[in-house]
Image (cartoon, rainbow, N blue to C red):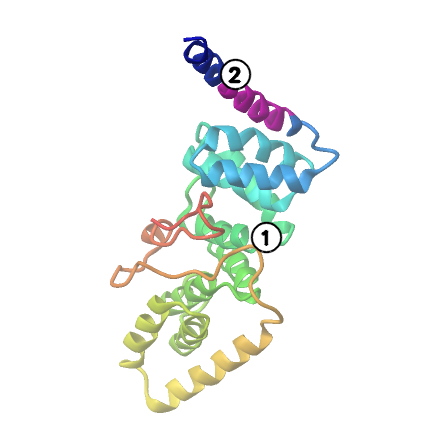
């Protein structure tokens, strides 16, 4: 009988010990100055596990200390109301901080925001500039959007040969939707124009100095969608695994 009476006590003690260990881990998070890399890992882990509310204050602390990855997450969380209230002004602020620090995913997202005019004034020139930065880092989706801009003459002159080149470069980086767009555009170009486009693609790919940073190699799920400034923003949301700009 005594052994049976002790079982509930042991169970309660075990649960308490687990809880105490968890709380100790969370309290240890406060040691930002000692180990910001560990704090970022915890924040991304919280977000990946679906606890955006727990991740948000951690990203906010890290972003305030100049962490570009945290600034990207924070900007996206403000943009989509993930773990906090939507705030377009704060989304733009933190995405700009991250983009200026070289975060490729943030550069791509700013390109989308300026293209769509969601939360910030539409500016096709700035949209092109940010897409170009992300494309220069080898981001396949940004390369695809550069093709879209050239194909429609947004933020610059219409140039279908250049669009073909960007689509081809993006396809070479693994973007299947770009392959679809390139093949679709090829039907309207002469063989000489296609050859020129492929030459442009070779130059674009040669200018990419290193593999993509700050974003995973993306794929497109937008095959068949009409391309317009109003439809571009949400037809590809992609970045780090289970990031706020995850694919729809």
Q: First in sequence, mark 1 or 2: give its number.
A: 2
To which residue does mark 2 refer? Answer: 13
- Residue at image position (38%, 85%) is 194
Give whichever of 66, 46 is nearer the camera: 46
To which residue does mark 1 refer? Answer: 103
Identify whether 159 is placed above or below 141: below
Residue that protrudes farthest toward the left in the picture: 224
- Residue at image position (26%, 59%) is 225
Q: Quadrant of residue 161?
A: bottom left
Which is closer to the viewer, label 1 or label 2? 2
| Mark drawn on residue 215 | none
Asked if residue 66 shows in the view, the reply is: no
Identify whether 14 is placed above or below 48: above
Q: Position of residue 195 (x, y in %)?
A: 41, 88
Q: Position of residue 203 (x, y in %)?
A: 54, 80
Identify whether 28 is placed above or below 107: above
Give whichever of 105, 157 is nearer the camera: 105
- Residue at image position (58%, 71%) is 208
Image-based side of 23 in relation to 4, left or right: right
Residue that protrudes farthest toward the front in the picture: 1
Give whichever of 140, 216 is nearer the camera: 216
Give whichever of 240, 95 is nearer the camera: 240
Q: Which residues are magenta?
A: 13-27
Q: Position of residue 9 (x, y in %)?
A: 48, 12
- In this figure, what is the number of numbered marks? 2
Q: Quadrant of the N terminus?
A: top left
Cα–Cα gap, marks 1 and 2: 46 Å
Image-based side of 52 in relation to 31, left or right: left
């Amino acid at each position: 009988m005594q052994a049976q009476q002790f079982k509930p006590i042991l169970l309660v003690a075990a649960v308490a010990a687990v809880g105490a260990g968890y709380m100790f881990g969370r309290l240890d998070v406060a040691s930002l100055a000692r180990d910001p890399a560990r704090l970022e890992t915890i924040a991304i882990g919280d977000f990946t596990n679906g606890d955006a509310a727990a991740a948000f204050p951690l990203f906010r602390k890290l972003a305030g200390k100049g962490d570009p990855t945290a600034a990207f997450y924070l900007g996206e969380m403000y943009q989509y109301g993930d773990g906090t209230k939507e705030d377009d002004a704060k989304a733009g602020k933190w995405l700009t901080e991250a983009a200026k620090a070289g975060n490729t995913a943030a550069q791509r997202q700013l390109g989308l925001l300026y293209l769509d005019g969601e939360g910030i004034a539409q500016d096709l020139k700035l949209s092109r500039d940010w897409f170009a930065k992300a494309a220069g880092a080898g981001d396949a989706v940004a390369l695809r959007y550069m093709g879209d801009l050239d194909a429609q003459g947004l933020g610059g002159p219409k140039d279908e040969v250049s669009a073909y080149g960007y689509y081809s470069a993006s396809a070479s980086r693994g973007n299947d939707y770009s392959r679809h767009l390139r093949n679709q555009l090829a039907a309207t170009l002469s063989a000489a124009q296609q050859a020129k486009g492929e030459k442009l693609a070779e130059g674009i790919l040669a200018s990419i100095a290193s593999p993509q940073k700050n974003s995973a190699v993306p794929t497109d799920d937008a095959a068949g969608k009409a391309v317009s400034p109003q439809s571009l923003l949400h037809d590809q949301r992609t970045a780090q695994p289970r990031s706020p700009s995850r694919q729809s």
